[in-house]
Image (cartoon, rainbow, N blue to C red):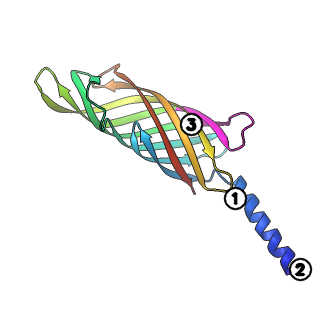
Amino acid sequence: MKKILCIAFMLFGVVQLSQAQKKDWAFGLRVGEPTGLNIKKYLGGKNALEFNIGSNGWGYSRGRKYWKGEFRRSLVIGANYLWQLSAGNTQGLDLYFGFGGQLSSRRYWDRDINREENALGVGVTGVFGLEYFVSASPVSFFLDFGPYIELAPAAGWAWIDAALGVRFNL
């Protein structure tokens, strides 16, 4: 009887692990734009909030036009509201999309005065992505991209943010 209870308990635990991929929170790292920390809060059902804290432009910023000159790098804080759907028949694969905003502290080369300057950027974001939840594991991998359109100071300046990353679901 003890063996049966022990086996039943273990099987129940495995089933719970394989079904409980989307917990309340997920914490991870993303590489791309921005590169940094990623936090996701599942709101139940098919919605989530995503937060990104990181930097843009490290190692590849030269030559990218920005406002009155050339973009250098920035520290970014962003948030998106997401809708998350199952992607076809592939178990553990979700498609997500959403919108939000981004605040950034930027460095750029101002061609008018020939020196680096700072700017506080505020803009809107869109995001489209795929997330794969590894079966029987708290780990998920994601790939996403979407537009960033600055409202100030360089109104209308646009860029595509894209990244891949890994999250640990708690």
For disc 1, the marked residue is 17
Query: In the current view of this chain or complex, which residue is farthest to the bottom?
Result: 2
The residue depicted at 40 percent of the width and 36 percent of the height is 33
Residue placed most toward the observer, 99 or 141 = 141
Q: Is 101 rendered above or below residue 156?
A: below
Residue 168 is a magenta residue: no
Mark-to-mark CA distance, 2 and 1? 24 Å
Kind of residue at badge 3: Leu
Residue 37 in picture, x, y percent from top left: 42, 48
Mark 3 Cα-neighbour bin, 10 Å: few <14, some 14–19, many ≥20: many
| Residue range corresponding to the magenta coloring | 82-98
Q: Earlier in the sequence, mark 1 or mark 3?
A: 1
Tell me where residue 15 sits by quadrant.
Answer: bottom right
| SS at circle 3 | strand
Mark-to-mark CA distance, 2 and 3? 47 Å
Query: In the current view of this chain or complex, which residue is farthest to the left?
Result: 113
For disc 2, the marked residue is 1
The residue depicted at 35 percent of the width and 19 percent of the height is 156
Tell me where residue 106 sits by quadrant.
Answer: top left
Q: Is 17 rendered above or below residue 81?
A: below
Q: Quadrant of the N terminus?
A: bottom right
